[in-house]
Image: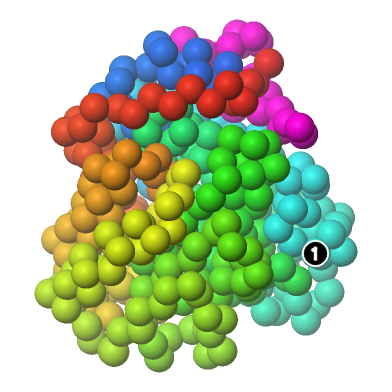
């Protein structure tokens, strides 16, 4: 069986502080779990998540820095540290994308038409950002298996399809993580619950002929992408849908989807662009509605005894502090859930890092 090595010197160290795991070459992720407060939720972050973009670019790149700062300020980190991922290597990314495209990104040689569809010129720091964010979601998946729940501070690049990126998404980090974990033999089946306001077309494209991965997207019908790729389960909402109807649809479908999918892990895209004041959303959720949404998903999945890996997804505002506060809803909900439930410890035996 092929095994993917998660090098502990980069996967289980913190960002800028001492930690029980840093610098201990032989420690596995499982060993780190044992010394982590069981009431905490592992949170993954890397400074490279925040690349530079031209001033006034529509994509709010600074939010990744602001999200990490807010998580630290609120004391949401177990042991006061982030888990730090490695950059996803070529072999991982090519499990979910056309190797020709992966090579174009790695060598920063992406055709102009493709870069236009993505919305960025693929310079070295943008390529590195995509690789670190993808490595982050892979690590989040493994940590979720060990701890029951884990969250990234980036990820959810769901418009990237097999052939290429699109819509501010370079690599589909969730699809890569699922493919890596399947190839490693630590999971067989996965469910993607995608509540970003935009449809998860790239994820649906990558898994369209795959019976072991179930995709569920709830989104605004009239929003990007114009041409949607059918997921296994799609709920299309009309413009202006607000808390009550949104949560009613979600509650009615989530349990059923979970039961039918029989996943070994759930990847949850907690995009905050369904918020009523989001620049690119067309729905009308309140802040309280977003929190209830995250709690509903996390509690439903965790009560079923299934590990959950949370990723950030989309969110758009010129007010970066407001946006970061909105995104951290996921991490707050995850921690509240972890405190209310016993941690499911699954010893996979495959999450070897040394
Ligand atoms: Zn979105």
Count of numbered badges drawn on the protein: 1
**Horizontal and vertical percent position of residue 344:** 34, 29
Way the structure is coloured: rainbow
Mark 1: secondary structure: loop
> Residue 86 vs residue 37: left or right?
right
Residue nearer the viewer, 53 or 331: 331
Residue nearer the viewer, 261 or 265: 261
Q: Which residue is mark 1?
A: 98
Residue nearer the viewer, 207 or 131: 207
Residue nearer the viewer, 327 or 215: 215
Residue 46 in view (yes/no): no
**What residue is rendered at 70% in x and 79% in y?**
116
- Above or below, comparing residue 213 to residue 284 in the picture: above
Q: Quadrant of residue 4?
A: top right
Q: Is residue 314 magenta?
A: no
For the stretch drawn in magenta, what is the main secondary structure? loop
**Horizontal and vertical percent position of residue 172:** 62, 60
Range of magenta residues = 1-27
Q: Is residue 3 magenta?
A: yes
**What residue is rendered at 37% in x and 17% in y?**
36
- Above or below, comparing residue 119 to residue 282 in the picture: above
Residue 239 in view (yes/no): yes
**Horizontal and vertical percent position of residue 254:** 29, 63
Mark 1 residue CB less than 8 A from any atom of ligand 1 = no
**What residue is rendered at 74% in x and 53% in y?**
95
**Horizontal and vertical percent position of residue 317:** 36, 68
- Above or below, comparing residue 330 to residue 34 in the picture: below
Screen quadrant of the N terminus: top right
Q: Quadrant of residue 103?
A: bottom right
């Amino acid at each position: 069986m092929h095994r993917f090595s998660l090098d502990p010197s980069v996967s289980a160290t913190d960002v800028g502080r001492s930690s029980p795991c840093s610098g201990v070459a032989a420690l596995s992720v499982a060993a780190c779990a044992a010394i982590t407060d069981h009431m905490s939720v592992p949170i993954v972050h890397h400074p490279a998540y925040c690349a530079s973009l031209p001033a006034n670019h529509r994509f709010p790149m600074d939010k990744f820095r602001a999200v990490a700062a807010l998580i630290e300020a609120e004391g949401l980190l177990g042991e006061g540290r982030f888990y730090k991922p490695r950059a996803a290597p070529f072999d991982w990314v090519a499990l979910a994308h056309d190797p020709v495209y992966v090579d174009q990104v790695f060598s920063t040689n992406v055709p102009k038409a493709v870069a236009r569809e993505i919305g960025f010129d693929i310079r070295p720091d943008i390529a590195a950002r995509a690789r670190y964010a993808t490595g982050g979601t892979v690590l989040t998946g493994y940590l979720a298996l060990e701890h029951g729940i884990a969250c990234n501070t980036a990820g959810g690049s769901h418009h990237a399809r097999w052939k290429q990126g699109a819509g501010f998404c370079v690599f589909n980090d969730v699809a890569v993580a699922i493919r890596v974990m399947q190839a490693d033999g630590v999971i067989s089946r996965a469910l993607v619950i995608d509540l970003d306001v935009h449809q998860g077309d790239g994820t649906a494209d990558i898994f369209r002929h795959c019976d072991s991965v179930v995709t569920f997207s709830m989104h605004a019908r009239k929003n990007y992408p114009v041409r949607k790729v059918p997921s296994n389960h799609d709920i299309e909402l009309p413009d202006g849908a607000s808390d009550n109807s949104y949560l009613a649809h979600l509650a009615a479908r989530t349990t059923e989807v979970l039961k039918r999918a029989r996943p070994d892990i759930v990847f949850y895209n907690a995009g905050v662009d369904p918020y009523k004041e989001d620049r690119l959303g067309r729905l009308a959720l309140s802040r309280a509605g977003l929190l209830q949404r995250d709690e509903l998903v996390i509690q439903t999945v965790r009560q079923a005894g299934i590990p959950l890996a949370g990723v950030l997804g989309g969110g758009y505002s010129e007010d970066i502090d407001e946006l970061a506060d909105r995104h951290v809803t996921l991490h707050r909900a995850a921690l509240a859930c972890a405190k209310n439930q016993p941690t499911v410890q699954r010893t996979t035996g495959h999450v070897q890092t040394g």
